[in-house]
Image: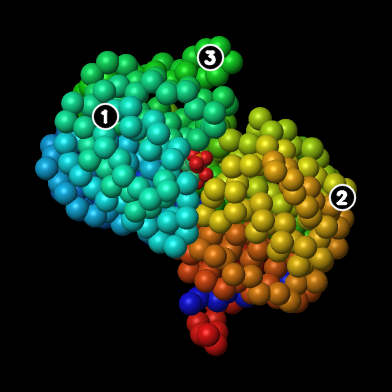
Amino acid sequence: MTIIKSYKSLSLNGEILIPGDKSISHRSLILSSCAIGMSTISNLLESEDVFSTLNALKTLGVKIKKHNQVWNVYGNGLGSIAGFKGQLNLGNSGTGVRLLMGLISGCDCEATFVGDESLSKRPMKRVIEPLMQSGAQIESEENSLPVTIKGSKIPLPINFSSNMSSAQVKSAVLISGLTSSGRTNYYEPILSRDHTERMLEFMGAKIKTSSCEGKWKISMAGLPTLKSVDFKIPNDPSSASFPIVSALITPNSQIMIKEVLMNKLRIGFIKTLLEMGGKIDVVNEKYSNGEKIADLIVKSSKLNAINVPANRSPSMIDEYPILSVAASFAKGKTTFNGVEELKYKETNRIAEVVDNLNRLGIAASSTQNKIIITGNNHKVVKGGIEIDSKLDHRIAMSFLCMGFCSSQPIIIKRAQTIQTSFPNFLESMKKIGGNLIKSNQRLPK
Ligand code: S3P
């Protein structure tokens, strides 16, 4: 087990390198596999989650090779997958498992999906239900892993209206629709991240997004010819959120983060931190591969509590743990509304955030769909506690960042989970002044 201890840090300064975006990395591998010809991917996030997807695609017979820092994916229009029968282990990756379920449901093959302790607890009904419409046969015990999918020989287009805004479910449905004739239609209440739509359009698919009877309708023409492309993955705003909040709460800090993805469906947390009084300058805005990117300059700030609206939730769904750290140091009571989906992440993040903040002496509580945090107005917290990550990388990184402003260290157990999304977190945070120490010591059983 890896243990990382986080100590009070004097200031954070300098430039920090952020890895490639996780959501776009998964999609670049999967969608390139569906194209005809060789696609190239540069700045792929080389983390455990993305390697889970990459290895699953290799198991499905897709040739993927790295050459001079660039990954080459030899797409054969899903030809190699036909006839496959076997197991796919997606480790900790919710995005990997759900998107690949979409792929398998529309192909003439059979796969059993398995994952780690955390992924095996996560709900799969949300993807199983719409994917059944394709004609795939899907078996599971109580809608969680292991899930076996026998794909449909002649997949039907899915027409599904969802009550939640989940980019994973939307993407699974669209990927399933790649092999069906006719239009695939998916409806969601608030627009979730749209990387799949953008990337598929870039490859030649025809997708229309419109508002329809109070929901967003995403509609794709079936059997598109996907051409191979060159993907350049922008840097991950969700990973950037950790040094951003760390610099805001640690006195005398100023950091720079370059070429961060600024897709508006991903940066609700920047909007929130700006409203709280965070000094974040967005400079050098430009476009890369159809996505907006920018450099960020972040300085220590006096943060004020705010009331964050529920409809912002899909655009900052992964950032609530680290935003809760920011709220803990703000002046006043912050309310995060519309957070019920957090229960179904790598852990129940509502419970993990509230319990651990309370253990650290911060007044935090929750209801079914709210987290309420009374900030300590920039005092240091006591620290001196051990927190089990429970295999949730964002819980691990969030509380390590909190340790930079605590008088006693915060100790994270099972910190190896950070490898799923931000493999260089420890070295990168240390380089800007974050006082982190890894100890490989084994705790007694
Ligand atoms: C993701 C979508 C989100 C997010 C996850 C990545 C994606 O999940 O929490 O980390 O890449 O599509 P949901 O779609 O379940 O909200």
Tell me which residue sits at (38%, 38%) in the image. Answer: 128
Question: Which residue is drawn at the image coordinates 47% and 23% (left, top)?
Answer: 161
Q: Amino acid at mark 2?
A: Lys
Would you say residue 374 is visible in this rendering? yes
> Which circle marks residue 211 in the picture?
3
Residue 207: x and y, percent? Answer: 37, 19
Is the C-beta of the residue carrying label 2 under 8 Å from the nearest atom of ligand 1?
A: no
Q: Residues within 10 Å of mark 2 (few under 14, many from 20)?
A: some
How crowded pointer 1 is (Cα within 10 Å; few <14, some 14-19, many 20+) is rated as some
- Give me the disc on residue 135: 1
**For discs 2 and 3, the disc positioned in front in the rendered view:** 3
Give the amino acid at mark 1.
Gly
From mark 1 to mark 3, how far is it between C-alphas? 28 Å
Q: Which one is nearer the viewer's eye here, 60 or 257?
A: 60
Q: Position of residue 257 (x, y in %)?
A: 57, 49
Q: Badge 3: few (under 14), some or many (20 or more) residues near its Cα, within 10 Å?
A: few
Determine whether 88 is above or below 40 in the image: below
* Disc ID at residue 331: 2
Compared to residue 230, the image places residue 413 above or below, namely: below
